[in-house]
Image: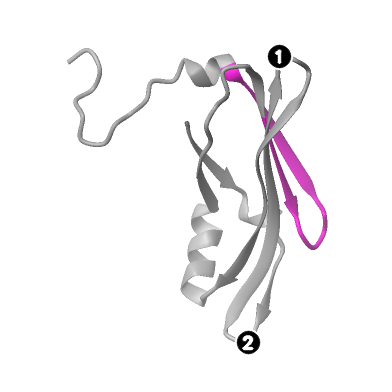
Amino acid sequence: MALALQLDPASVTVERKGDRWEGAFQISIVQSLKSGGLFTSLDTTVGLRLTPALYDRMLKEGIVVNRKVPLREDALQLLVVVSDSRTRATGSLIIPAAELRAVPTVVPGAPPSGS
């Protein structure tokens, strides 16, 4: 499953260092399972080192994170947690797995389903 997250640029602290804007955030994607367990699909730190042009773009468009996450058959929910590395400010999102399974898969170049 393809997951696209758009983060508010104000949620990630960046500071000017020389000719770049630098910052970082942690992102965790975890699946809660029918057994009561958890399966970690992603747990990483994303570093930012932006040119002035990319910094301006981030302010206008936000920060977009694209990730492919194989959804387990026994997953009940997808839990997404994002945390600013400097301030530790945290945001989270819980998506029922049934809703993700109901979204049709889009194949680039293929005609829409039902055509």
Percent x, y of residue 58 = 53, 60
Side of 90 relative to 28 (left or right): right
CA distance separating discs 1 and 2 = 49 Å
Percent x, y of residue 104 = 38, 20
Say if 106 sits above or below 9 in the image.
above
Residue linked to disc 2: 18
Task: Tell me the colour scheme of the image.
Answer: one colour
What is the chief secondary structure element of the magenta stretch? strand
**Disc 1 secondary structure class:** loop
Mark 1 is surrounded, within 10 Å at the Cα level, by few (under 14), some (14 to 19) or many (20 or more) other residues, namely few
Query: Which is more toward the observer, 8 or 94?
Result: 94
Query: Which is more toward the observer, 47 or 41?
Result: 41
Residue at coordinates 23% horizontally, 22% vertically from top-left?
112
Is residue 83 one of those drawn in magenta? yes
Residue at coordinates 55% horizontally, 26% vertically from top-left?
71
Residue type of the residue flagged with mark 1: Lys
**Disc 2 secondary structure class:** loop
Percent x, y of residue 56 = 51, 67
Q: Quadrant of residue 24?
A: bottom right
Side of 38 relative to 58 (left or right): right
Say if 69 sits above or below 95 in the image.
below
Mark 2 is surrounded, within 10 Å at the Cα level, by few (under 14), some (14 to 19) or many (20 or more) other residues, namely few
Q: Residue furthest bottom?
A: 18
Tell me which segment is drawn in magenta: 79-97
Residue type of the residue flagged with mark 2: Gly
Residue at coordinates 60% horizontally, 66% vertically from top-left?
48
Say if 24 sits above or below 65 in the image.
below
Residue at coordinates 55% horizontally, 53% vertically from top-left?
62
Residue linked to disc 1: 34
